[in-house]
Amino acid sequence: MGLRIGVIGGTGLYEWGPGEAVEIDTEFGPANATFHKSGQAEVVFLPRHGPRHDVPAHRVDSRVHVRAMKAARVDYVVGVFNTGTLSPSLKPSQWLVLDDLIDTTQARPRTFDEGPTVHVDFARPFCSQARKALVSSAPAQTLDHGVYATTQGPRFETAAEARLLRSWGADVAGMTAGPEAALAREAGLCYAGLAFVANGADEEGLRAQVIQRRLATAARALRAWVLRATSRLPVRKSCDCSTAPQRGTMGPSRVRA
């Protein structure tokens, strides 16, 4: 049996093609997913903002999407993000395979931890094996690294905020990756992030609809990329994503008296 890949789509990516619609119940609410067969692989797709983009970034409850992917028993998850560049060297329609992130969001669900206490290792927030497969199968001009700065939203960043984030080492800015990646690690999922540069550093005042449309235009190439990567993902994993929750769980000391 082939691998089952979860894909969580960002702004402009609301469907994956013909598939079976399934509502997945979670303790945080239902998730409307579609299951797609492609050769030996299966893709479980979730639109992060809903199929009509009626959930703004600051109201996205990533717990629903992560729990749904866990319930669907996916082998790997790819989060796709529509971002703005913080670097003049990055151009619109360029892709980055993310390797790190910064989270500045506030008052959003970012943990499942209601006891026992879990401190997951998050030094490298993206699965090494998933990243390797995505990098090795990436389209031309794709960067094999990138730091995503997660802002609160729903507004875009001021010029001063963009300069600050750039000084911190961020390459792109968006509004959703931080909580989603952290929850995926707590759930023990192998999770990777792809950032699409929807607007350049010199494109101030760009309409939101234009940013949305650019990722929609790139969706066909993205689907082909994910399927190429799927053929390079190992069935037997050597990463430690799945054991992160157990390794981070705190409990009473068992030192012998």
Image: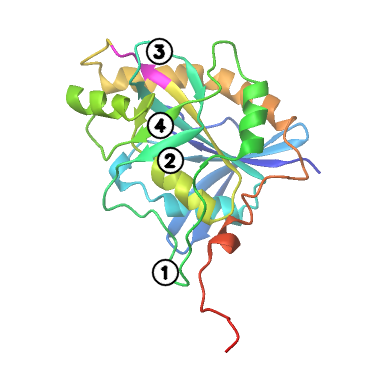
Does label 1 or label 4 sit earlier along the sequence? Answer: 1
Q: Which residue is mark 3?
A: 92
Q: Nearer the viewer, residue 237 or 63?
A: 237
Q: Which residue is mark 4?
A: 148
Q: Position of residue 203 (x, y in %)?
A: 27, 12
Q: Which residue is mark 2?
A: 48
Q: Secondary structure at mark 1?
A: loop
Q: Position of residue 53 (x, y in %)?
A: 36, 36
Q: CA distance from mark 1 to mark 2?
A: 24 Å
Q: Secondary structure at mark 3?
A: loop
Amino acid marked by disc 4: Tyr
Amino acid marked by disc 3: Pro
Q: Which residue is mark 1?
A: 114
Give left or right: position of 166 versus 131: left
Mark 4 Cα-neighbour bin, 10 Å: few <14, some 14–19, many ≥20? many
Does label 1 or label 3 sit earlier along the sequence? Answer: 3
